[in-house]
Structures are given as structure tokens and as C-alpha cells.
Image (tube, rainbow, N blue to C red):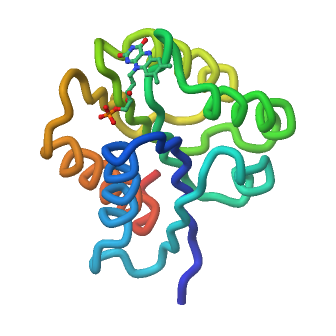
Amino acid sequence: MTSKHLLIVCNTPSENTQALANAALAGAQHESIENTRVTLQTPLETNSEDVKRADGIVIGTTENFGYMSGLIKDFFERIYYPCLEETQGKPYALYIRAGNDGLGTKTGVEKIITGLRWKSVQPALILQGDYQPQFAEQVKELGHLMAAGIDNGIY
Ligand SMILES: Cc1cc2nc3c(=O)[nH]c(=O)nc-3n(C[C@H](O)[C@H](O)[C@H](O)COP(=O)(O)O)c2cc1C
């Protein structure tokens, strides 16, 4: 019986970033995952209750103006205080799609998540430069890793 839940929240302003979101979902829905349901949502449609209910979260953002996307920032602004006391230790993974180095985004997101005291499952995955088809494979792997860890009670 399905008993756990992985939430994927990412902004997808382009075909490439939509492909990355779909890859995260596909990886998390791998046939080996037995008891973990996966939801892919936009930042705008995600609220603090969704976060509280999730057993783990994948965050995906573009780098815009050297920082996380406005939609992901808005998401954090809405969920931060409602989640602060109730989501400590929540496992998460982060991927960043950036034309340049993505470091401003990584620093910004990690600062917020340090405040929330979520638990990092793997170092931030930064997909830099011109879009490469292997980016989707990397994000698929990240989705699979998260779902497998939740499914097996590792995190
Ligand atoms: C308004 C705007 C600002 C952006 N600023 C940055 C930036 O500061 N650093 C960066 O690496 N990429 C920046 N980008 C590029 C986006 O990260 C990129 O368009 C997005 O990740 C989609 O990637 P794609 O071209 O593979 O679809 C910016 C894009 C937009 C639309």
C-alpha cells in the first residue's frame, strides 16, 4: 500500500526546464519504488500543508539575476514560518538550471534551508552552461535517489 509521499516543486519557464521536471518525476516513479507516491507541482500551487505532508522534497529552480527564480523565492516566503517548527529534518534535494555558475542560487536556497533545518540528501546539482541532454539524466537520477531513500526509510 502506498504510504509515503515525495513532493517535487520546480519552476519551468522553458522547454528544457520542463524536460528536467519531467525527468525528476520519471526517476521518482521508477518501477523499483513501491510505496512512495510522487507529486510534481509548480511553486505557485504548493503551500505549507503540502510541504508538511511530504516525506521529502525535490526543489528545482532556474538561476535568474544571479539568484533563485522569483517563483521559488515566493514559495519559500509563503512556507517558511508556517513550516519552521514542523518540518525540521525533512530530507530534500536541490537542482539548479543556470546559464552561468548557479552559485548565487545555491547559496540563497541553502541559506533558507539552513534556517528551516531540512536535511540535505546530496550536494546541490547545478546544471551549468548550454543545455545538455545529460542534464535530464542527472535530474532523473536525483529523483530516483530521493524516492528510493524515502521508500526504503533511509532518510
Ligand atoms: C530574466 C532572466 C534572468 C536570468 N539570469 C540568469 C543569471 O543570472 N544567471 C544564469 O546563470 N542564468 C540566468 N538566466 C538564464 C536562466 O537560468 C535560463 O534561461 C533557464 O535556466 C532556462 O534554461 P534553458 O535555456 O536551458 O531553457 C536568466 C534568465 C532570465 C529569463
Q: Is residue 141 left or right of residue 112?
A: left
Q: Is residue 8 left or right of residue 114?
A: left
Q: Look at the picture and state if 154 lies above or below 4.
A: above
Residue at point 14%, 37% (across, down): 132
Residue 23: in sight, yes or no? yes
Q: Quadrant of residue 154?
A: bottom left
Residue at point 52%, 41% (across, down): 11
Residue 114 in the image: state x and y as whole percent. 60, 21
Q: Look at the picture and state if 132 lies above or below 63.
A: below
Q: Quadrant of residue 125?
A: top left
In this view, the residue farthest toward the right is 82
Residue 105 in the image: state x and y as whole percent. 47, 17
Quarter of the render that holds ligand 1: top left
In this view, the residue farthest toward the front is 14
Q: Is residue 29 left or right of residue 48?
A: left
Q: Is residue 17 left or right of residue 92?
A: left
Residue 20 in the image: state x and y as whole percent. 33, 49
Please tell me how many numbered marks the rendered image carries.
Answer: 0
Residue 58 in the image: state x and y as whole percent. 48, 47
In this view, the residue farthest toward the bottom is 1
Residue at point 47%, 33% (across, down): 61
Q: Look at the picture and state if 77 lies above or below 140.
A: above
Residue 92: in sight, yes or no? no
Residue at point 37%, 72% (across, down): 29
